[in-house]
Amino acid sequence: MPSYRYSLLILCIGVVLSSPLRADPFEDFLRQALQRNHGLQAEFQNWQARVNSADASGFLPEPMITYDYYFKPDEPKDGPQSQELMLEQRLPWFGVRGLQKSARQQQAEAGYWQWQARRLELQMQAGDLYADLFYWQQALAISQKNLALLQELEAIARARYRVATTSHPDLIRIQLEVGKATDELLSLEQQKPSLQARIATLLSDRSGAQSVPWPERLPDIPALDSAALDTQIQQHPMLQQQTSLLRNAETAVALADKRYGPEVTLRYGHMFVNESTDPMMKDGDNFPEYVGIAVSAPIWFSQYDALKKAAHSRVLSAQDSQAFLQDQLTAQVHQAEFQLRDSRRKLTLYQDDLIPRAEESLQAQLRAYQTGQTTFLELLDAEKLLLELQLLAVKSQADQWKAYHALLLASGRFYRTDLAGGAP
């Protein structure tokens, strides 16, 4: 093979091996939810509205143009005044416009963190739903196998009853168990439309056109460092939102201080004078112009004091809310860590110890029952115990996945770093 062809082959192999693997089904599901959910889109638009409102703040008040027309003109020295045009511009006290713009920007920043917090909540909702879909899928398969086994046992019991080797109460008992298993399977099958409705709500897809895989397994959960989680809490979107609200409350205090200062209004006027009817008063085209200034008189100090006290109270409220929220998030992280460890311990216990023993016990009971060394009720008890342990193992898997997403929500982490929103 020529050297250039060999190099080309090596390059192609390297490209294939270095290409990223396809995202796991849950990541695809989560991305669809983040892109399509109407509630999240509404939160995004709320943030954009605050950003645009901040961009529209900090300007001078609109100038006022006043036009007066005199039906009965006054005739001073220069001639009868028939019209007057006046321009006014109000000037807030020094620093007011900058503080107003800062307040709007802080509100926009709080809106951004509120959108980020809503993304985290939606991520947890998607995780919970995905776990429920997994549990439903596995419980349905286990229940179908259980029903098939019970139906086989019922056939054996009928055959033994015909030759009088099984009592009538044993046959009735197995028939009751078959009826209960059939009812449980029917309940699971009827649960599917409600799960589909939850999928449609999360994806904002009423038509149901979006295909969502019903998972047969859950993704592996990475190891998490408790110290890193405690550090991550400080960057939680909800805490960042509280920080923005605290700064906004502090800005409100500064604005309340500005109420003690006056506002200034500048005026410019132009009078239109008609030609005088008195020849002695004619002195050419003389249109009077004037400038003026008006200053407000801030005298209601008790009102300004009350507004400032209210602003201080909002600062204290924001500080306490931030401290309380941090305590809550810390407690939620520790609770989610416990639930994650506990569900992982239970899953290991069921899969590695109890279920293998229950399967061994059921096989032994089947062999003993065929040789008449055990009763039919003991066989049913062994089968029911295995079913219960299998369902508990599946539930532990689902609980572990839910606890992981509760931990992500409490610590403010995303399932993938690229799933976070853009910069504020």
Image (cartoon, rainbow, N blue to C red):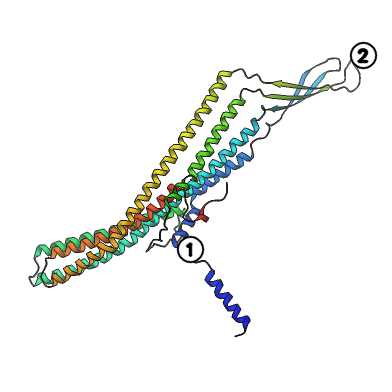
Cβ atoms under marks 2 and 1 closer than 8 Å:
no
Name the amino acid, label 1: Ala
Q: Is residue 345 above or below residue 85?
A: below
Q: Secondary structure at mark 1?
A: loop
Residue 231: horizontal and vertical position, in percent?
47, 47
In the rendered image, the vertical position of residue 287 relative to residue 228, given as above or below: above
Residue at screen point 64% across, 23% down: 261
Most foreground residue, 224 or 206: 224
Residue at the front extreme? 227
Query: Earlier along the polypeptide chain: callout 2 or callout 1?
Result: 1
State the separation of the CA atoms marked 2 and 1.
96 Å
* Displayed quadrant of residue 140: bottom left
Residue designated by label 2:
280
Mark 2 element type: helix
Disc number for residue 23: 1
Looking at the image, residue 171 lies above or below residue 331: below
Q: Nearer the viewer's eye, disc 2 or disc 1?
A: 1
- The spot of residue 135 in percent (x, y) is 34, 58
Q: Residues within 10 Å of mark 1 (few under 14, many from 20)?
A: few
Q: What residue is rendered at 87% in x and 18% in y? A: 276
Q: Residues within 10 Å of mark 2 (few under 14, many from 20)?
A: few
| Amino acid type, mark 2 | Met
Residue 7 left/right relative to 221: right
